[in-house]
Image: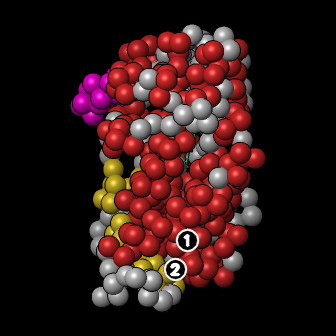
């Protein structure tokens, strides 16, 4: 279905008309055809594997500093969710070109966008004002003249200058990229660390061979897809197995469920195995035309963070109860306490208790 964009279109990614018409309308996620191609092209260079590779050293340095800071301030213990939030948040906001003082305020709003993609209910209603405020908030904080040339926003305004979009499209476009990049990565990184803390043998394997870090991220995403599902609108009557689906109906695609399908993954579908050969074949990044545009960036951040942890910690273990973050579409954790056994004392830091 993800590969069949003739029958299943993205104008219908959220479950309610209000969200599709008022909040998602015109964004890269919910566009089809030529407009989608144009919206997707605007940051394709910045998000390409080649450009992201050039960020590698910067991300490794940031990951190392953050891991030291979090482990040090917790005297050997840390919250995997807070660490991942800072890693992904700092990276995306910096690349986006947003002024540092607005980072926390935007960070608090992005999950609301996913709540409003789900069914109408108390959580949806509570999120509506926050989700609708993202674009006006960015309008108030970003001005064309203060945007750095080499940032994502800089690239978006260059496309406006080149006549590819109207000026009024710039902020909605930027907000969709920020929203797509933030919570997804935070939850994915958090889950990878949580899984490794629960599976000491897998942690040892990773420490012996850190090239397995990318597979560890894929396994975490397969098991606990941060975006559990998105909708599609049926554009033309279509047959699926024995069922006909009528034009105008909506389907909900369950990326999370696909990651646990025993027909695909075998009897060990529920196992976290960082040496799984086809680990990258999950649907947590979607597939087809709307497949995640930020895969290289998400994986690079994950690799940097896991490598930094592997070089400093001989062992990770759960250190108390983790808290789920509740959201209509996202799945993951808001707090995951981890105890780290260190390879040695951190330079200039307190000793773990
Ligand atoms: C682990 C982290 C991530 C996960 C699990 C994830 C997941 C997804 C999924 C499932 C979709 C498909 C939507 C659909 O089927 O309609 C998607 C699309 C998208 N993602 Fe990601 N994402 C992640 C990180 C990122 C990052 C770092 C960026 C950076 C900008 C990003 C940008 C986008 C964009 C722009 C789209 C829309 C693509 C389109 O509609 O053509 N994502 N993502």
Image quarter of residue 211? bottom right
In the structure shown, which secondary structural element does the residue marked by tag 1 occupy?
A: helix
Q: Which mark is residue 166?
A: none
Residue at left offset 50%, top offset 44%: 94
Above or below 157: residue 77: below
Instruction: Report x, y in % for residue 74.
Output: 31, 74
Q: Which residue is mark 1?
A: 308
Q: Are marks 2 and 1 in contact (CB under 8 Å)?
A: yes
Identify the residue at horizontal 66%, vertical 82% (top origin).
Answer: 208
Q: Position of residue 109 (x, y in %)?
A: 34, 36
Q: Give the class, few, some or many, for how many residues have Cα within 10 Å of label 1's Cα (few <14, many ≥20).
A: many
Residue at the spot of label 2:
312
Q: Would you place residue 283 above or below residue 140 in this image?
A: below
Percent x, y for residue 320?
A: 29, 73
Quadrant field for ligand 1: top right
Tell me the magenta residue range: 121-133
Residue 222, placed above or below residue 23: below
């Amino acid at each position: 279905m993800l590969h069949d964009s003739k029958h299943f279109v993205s104008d219908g990614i959220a479950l309610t008309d209000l969200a599709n018409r008022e909040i998602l309308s015109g964004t890269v996620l919910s566009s089809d055809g030529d407009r989608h191609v144009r919206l997707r092209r605007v940051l394709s260079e910045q998000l390409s594997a080649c450009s992201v590779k050039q960020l590698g050293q910067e991300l490794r340095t940031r990951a190392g500093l953050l891991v030291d800071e979090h482990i040090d301030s917790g005297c050997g213990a840390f919250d995997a969710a807070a660490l991942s939030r800072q890693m992904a948040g700092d990276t995306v906001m910096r690349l986006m070109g947003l002024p540092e003082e607005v980072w926390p305020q935007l960070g608090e709003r992005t999950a609301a966008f996913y709540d409003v993609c789900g069914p109408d209910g108390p959580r949806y209603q509570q999120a509506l004002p926050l989700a609708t405020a993202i674009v006006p908030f960015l309008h108030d904080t970003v001005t064309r003249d203060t945007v750095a040339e080499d940032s994502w926003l800089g690239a978006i305004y260059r496309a406006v200058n080149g006549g590819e979009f109207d000026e009024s499209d710039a902020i909605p476009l930027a907000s969709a990229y920020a929203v797509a990049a933030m919570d997804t990565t935070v939850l994915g990184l958090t889950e990878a660390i949580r899984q490794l803390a629960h599976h000491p043998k897998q942690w040892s394997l990773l420490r012996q061979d850190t090239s397995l870090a990318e597979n560890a991220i894929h396994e975490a995403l397969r098991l606990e897809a941060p975006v559990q599902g998105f909708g599609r609108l049926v554009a033309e009557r279509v047959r699926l197995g024995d069922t006909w689906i009528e034009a105008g109906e909506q389907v909900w695609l369950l990326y999370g469920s696909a990651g646990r399908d025993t027909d695909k993954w075998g009897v060990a579908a529920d196992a976290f195995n960082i040496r799984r050969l086809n680990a990258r074949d999950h649907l947590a990044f979607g597939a087809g035309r709307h497949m995640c545009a930020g895969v290289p960036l998400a994986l690079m951040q994950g690799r940097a963070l896991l490598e930094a942890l592997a070089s400093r910690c001989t062992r990770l273990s759960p250190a108390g109860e983790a808290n789920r973050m509740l959201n209509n579409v996202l799945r993951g954790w808001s707090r995951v306490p981890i105890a780290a056994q260190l390879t040695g004392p951190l330079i200039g830091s307190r000793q773990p208790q």
